[in-house]
Amino acid sequence: MAASSTYSIVEYFGGEDGYKCGYCKNENGNFSHGMWSHALTVQDYQDLIDRGWRRSGKYIYKPIMNQTCCPQYTIRCDSINFQPSKPQKKILKKMGKYLCKGELPKPPSDGELMDSLCEDAGSCDAPVPCGSEVSVSVEGPVETVKSAGPGEKTGREESGQSTQQSREQTAPPKPGLGADPSRPPCRKAKEVRKERKLQKELQKQSGREAGSASLPQTEAARPSPPSKTIEELIAESLPADAVYKLEVRLVRSSPPSSQFKATFHESYQVYKRYQMTVHKDPPDKPSESQFRRFLCDSPLEAENPSDGPDCGYGSFHQQYCLNGKIIAVGVIDILPACVSSVYLYYDPDYSGMSLGVYSALRELAFTRQLHKKAPRLRYYYMGFYIHSCPKMRYKGQYRPSDLLCPETYVWVPIERCLPKLDLTRYSRFNEAPEAGRLNWRRGWF
């Protein structure tokens, strides 16, 4: 238990019966321990999630890893050493482009991940952490080219140049003896693209070598510029001369702050639309009481130690506001060693903005910001990584990340875990024979 004047009070429910899995839809394949938490200190909850537990409202559960159909491994990202990937940088560019031009991109056909956590602009003097405000000038309308409809003709068709081609394409194939042995065999388009890409890279490399030979030695050996930090990339995606303003507000949800109460109804309406549109819930399911139980009620005791972050520890909502309108809300817990992502919901009208990935990048930057005041707080917990469910592997794209060994409770780099998970759904990651004994004595199963 935490060394504090307050106590944690939990009620254990057991985990003998299986129930329906939300990932593989197995009717009774999901097994987990469960507890109802009446009160919980932030340090006790930190210890719990470091042993594979996770909360949903005031209910805390832990999958029984060697029995459940879809093992769920706790995953964390080291925010201090985090470097965004190329697809993640594209997500930040997309946000900056929208703020500048006001054009909403089309939503992805397979839905968004990093409500699913698991894609450059000008420079700014200082990074823009949580709570940044942005304004952007909107450019004129963009011209669009209308494609020819079913009953219309293109210029080439009117000139009759493509008529013969269309006849040849629609003509039935003539019977024959199969592939012509005198011609090279057919190849997959993917292989052809890879070969062309490789050839281009070789041409570029040979061009660089030829150019560097004529340069002075000091200029040829000049190192490449350092990679930009996540703060710099976020700042670049938020132009200073904006008409559109993107603000990220941090409001305490438990106990509810005055700002949380003032925005509760607006936030709930975003959640209701999200559940009905993205998760196909019937209108009566995402009720206000269900919203409170799921995302507002928290067992965590609010704490404000002198050596902690200015906002304190506990449960919060991060509200993403566009020109004062809430378009997304990230539910997070701020704990002594991490920021733990609980849930994300957003306005379906902005589904093309990849807000799941964007909010994860902002939460990573926020974790780095808190680390400056509270050095122990450096990790970003993304919940569970589920390798057996391909749609839930996106969380492994935030590097460097670790998975929690389900037997020894030791953090292991994800690169060492993935080969084992490719072979079997359940695996012990830490092979040290003595590693589990000391950790089992700590309790919490």
Image (cartoon, rainbow, N blue to C red):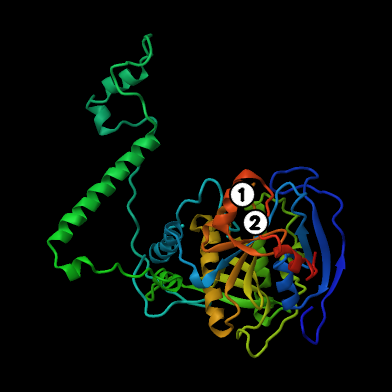
| Whether residue 435 is visible | yes
Give the structural element (helix, strand or loop) at label 2. Answer: loop
* Residue 429 x/y as whole percent: 64, 56
Q: Residue furthest bottom?
A: 306
Q: Residue furthest left?
A: 214
Contact (Cβ within 8 Å) of mark 1 with mark 2: yes
Q: Quickly name the residue at label 2.
A: 429
Which residue is at 23% across, 48% downward? 203
Which element type, helix, strand or loop, lies under badge 1? helix
| Quadrant of the frame with the N terminus | bottom right
Residue 114 versus residue 248 in the image, above or below: above
Q: Is residue 183 left or right of residue 268?
A: left
Q: Which mark is residue 60?
A: none
- The residue identified by callout 1 is 420
Q: Would you call the spot at circle 1 few (<14 residues within 10 Å), some (14-19), or many (20 or more)?
A: some
Indicate the position of residue 289 as horizontal and vertical percent values. 78, 65
Residue occupying the point 83% across, 65% down: 35
As shown in the figure, which amino acid type bears the numbered disc 2? Phe
When the figure is inspected, residue 207 is found, relative to residue 271, above or below; the finding is: above
**Rendered position, 389 above or below 210:** above
Residue 299, quarter of picture: bottom right
Badge 2 crowding class, 10 Å Cα cut-off, few under 14, some 14 to 19, many 20 or more, is many
- Tell me residue 10's x, y (percent): 85, 71
User: Camera-side residue: 251 or 386?
Assistant: 386
Quarter holding the C terminus is: bottom right
Q: Nearer the viewer, residue 241 or 376?
A: 376
Give the quadrant of residue 423: top right
- The tag earlier along the polypeptide, 1 or 2, is 1
